[in-house]
Amino acid sequence: LTAPADAAGTVFVIDDDASVRRALERQLRTAGFRVETFESAQDYVARAPQAAIACIVTDVRMPGMSGLDLQDSLSQAGRALPMVFITGHGDIPTTVRAMKGGAVNFLPKPFAEREILAAVAEALQRSAVIERERRELGSLHARYEVLTAREREVLALVVAGLLNKIIADRLGIQETTIKVHRGRVMEKMGAASLADLVRMGERLGLAPGAGPARR
Amino acid sequence: MTSRLIPIMIDPARAVPAPGSPSVGELLAFERLLAELSAGFVNLSPVSVDDAITDALRRIVGLLDVDRANLIGFAPETGESHLTHSWTVNDFASAARRSVSGDFPWAMQRLQAGHPIVFSRLDELPAEAAADEATWRRIGVKANLTVPMTVGGRIEGAIALASFRRERHWPEELVSRLRVLAEVFGNALAFKRARESLDSAMKFERLVSEMLAALLTTERAEDRDRVIEAGLRDMALFLGAERATLWERLGAGPEFRKTHRWLAAGVPVPPDQTGGVALPWISAQVVAGSVVRFASCADLPPEAAADLPALRELGVRSLVIVPLTLAGAVVRALSFATAHEERDWPEALMPRIALLGEVLGSVLARDEAHRREQEARAQAVHATRVGAMGAFAASLAHELTQPLAASLANAETGVRLLAAAVPDLDELRATLADIVADERRAGDLVQKLRRFLRRGEVERGELDLRELLEEVLRLVDREAEVRGVRLRLEIAEAPPKVVGDRVQLQQVVLNLLSNAIDAVTTRDRPVREVAVLAGRCGEGVSVEVRDSGAGMDGETLARAFQAFFTTKPKGMGLGLSISRTIVEAHGGTLAAHSAPGQGSTFRIELPLRPSRPAA
């Protein structure tokens, strides 16, 4: 019955029923979450609220766009957020579709407080993880951007697991020069070890012959 | 002694000067007898033909002063000779009806070849007739005149005159007269046979038409099976068969599956098998639309050799099998068989049996199509109603869950707020106010529903109570059958028509019936009975649904009609509440009587027409 320790996040509540919207807003707010309410999925899409860490609690059956349609549409637009579905009329196909689409939970109305609070906490936690990963990838890309063309070549071959000597042969330059490039790459990327550098390369999607992953 | 019509006819050998020429009086008497018999045999019923023949034999015995006159018949299929009619003067023992082939091998062969047997003394017989002579000697025959008898152009018997008391001469003239007499007899027998076959054909047709009529008026599957089996029995008994089987063709191949069968008492149950594999030739004939008929397996053509082992295994001695066609395709087959003896199936009936095949085939198919259509329609009606009720219930459930969900969220929030060191009283007040508002809203929804049911688009029409109830019963018939529940509908006399909404009232009865069926099947009730009783009741009508279930205690009974009260794990608790609303909207009442262990009775009382629509 205590507010979650990490309530740093926003819960977007979407329900066409004013009573439910009001009750949910109060329940989550008094439990320590920041809450914003929307009376329809279209309303949410139109207002496009921004928050680094957030989740959506939405009714499934609503006039106009349904909760499932919203899930699809956000996912296609690359704006997916962890979602908790609530419904007065749950059926297995709907539940399966929602869970396949990445729903955190699917709660039939009326639901117990501990269920909705636990679901929202989990959804926000998931959002936090996603956000952290997103940021890390962003910074990796930023660091990769400052590498010279030659350094990018060397990085790709290092990630592919080739020895300096072989890299030197491939690129037709001295092995000592390769060592210099490598040291500079480690430094620019902020890698603590070779293993660290390889992991970064993999996250950037560098494979032999392949370019970096798109952002 | 019988009185003699012509006393002078004693012994032609002695009484008549020239042997071989009967007296004029004798011939006249004979002509008169012939004329009388010819006239008399016409317009006889088949039953009296036998008596008439015996009486004619008696008159011949008297007229010709012989001691015995016999009529002998030859069975066409076996060549066996039987004594069929006989008259003997009183001084001697009468002849028993029996087979005479063994006693008179020479004589029967000659007669079947068209020759008469004439001897005045036993020693006139040739040496080949030794066996015959011995028989005549044993019986005490001293002289004999026998002429073949033709029926419908074929030699089918003989008339024999015997003298026990003395040897005697048979004039040529008498022999030819007797041949004419044999012809008259033959005509009479042909006539009898034609009448018999006509009668039997008519009887067969009556059997067939009765069976078809019964089939067309029977709806329940079990009853239909009984009708078909009874029809098979009647036809088998009529045809002298010991087994009658109705087969259904599997797909378009040569295989058939038994659907109905009748077996005579004492006939072993044949092993079950499909005909296509075991009886390749017969199946091929039937599938090609031909009737297969044989009196003995020995009559089958060589191509049917492969069928013999299975026929032996099935114990079939003789068989007739008819394809049943529908729109030119063989869909079923009807077979009659004997197991104990060989049987010749009357030729005259074959076209009729084939016709029966056609008619029965199309009636069964039509009937099946009709049943399938009815089933489909009943299912569609059921699905529509269930769907409508389901959608209604679902939308109601959805609407009700909103305030319920909001209230629960608010109530739990309220509890949490109170647990704080310093409760936020403003928040708490707002929370409680919201709970009150939502509970009101839930109550309003139920009210709205009731008003809708009362005022909604009610179609009032004149309803036939019997029709209405029978339709509902049909909807739950299958369900009841599956769950082993016996449904009974009792309607006292003809209740008057009621004005009301057919679908709504049917939903009420349907609801009461499903509850009753649930009640008798929830526990392992030994008696699973649900009765619907309808009749007049004062100025209106009443319908009672009684079950043999566990009954209800006082508390359950008191709450039975409350909305959202249910004893069922998946129930909404709205059925009885809505039912009562509907009945009351019709100006009637719905009440329950029950006690634990006594089952429950729900009673609807309806006025003939609602006095005024309740608001």
Image (cartoon, rainbow, N blue to C red):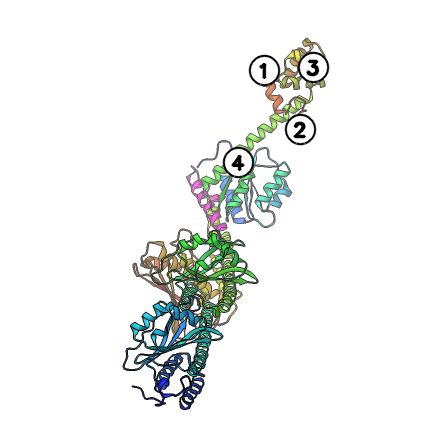
For the residue labelled by badge 2, is the local secondary structure a helix, a strand or a loop? loop
Between B183 and B429, the one nearer to me in the picture: B183
Residue named by callout 2: A214
Categorize mark 2 by other alpha carbons within 10 Å: few (<14), some (14-19), many (20+). few
**What chain does mark 4 sit on?**
A
Location of mark 3 (residue): A170
**Label 3 is found on which chain of the structure?**
A
Q: Which residue is mark 1?
A: A193
Q: Any mark on residue B465, and which?
A: none
Residue B420 magenta:
yes
Residue B523: give x, y in percent of width and height. 33, 54
Query: Mark 3 and mark 4 in contact (Cβ < 8 Å)?
Result: no
Identity of the residue drawn at 61% across and 21% down: A200
Q: Nearer the viewer, mark 4 or mark 3?
A: 3
**Residue B564, x across and y down, in percent:** 42, 55
Whole-angstrom CA distance, mark 4 to mark 3, is 48 Å
Q: CA distance from mark 4 to mark 1?
A: 34 Å
Dot 4, how many residues are within 10 Å of its Cα: few (below 14), some (14-19), or many (20+)?
many
For the magenta stretch, what is the residue range?
B400-427
- The answer to whether marks 4 and 1 mark residues whose Cβ atoms lie closer than 8 Å is no
Q: In the picture, which quadrant includes the N terminus of chain B?
A: bottom left
Asked whether the residues under the numbered discs 2 and 4 touch, taking CB atoms below 8 Å apart as contact, a structural biologist would say no
Q: Position of residue B117 (x, y in %)?
A: 40, 75
Both marks 2 and 4 on one chain: yes
Q: Are marks 4 and 1 on the same chain?
A: yes
Earlier along the polypeptide chain: callout 2 or callout 4? 4
For the residues bearing labels 1 and 2, Cβ distance under 8 angstroms: no
Residue marked by disc 4: A123
> Which chain is disc 2 placed on?
A
Q: Earlier in the sequence, mark 4 or mark 3?
A: 4
Residue type pointed to by label 3: Arg
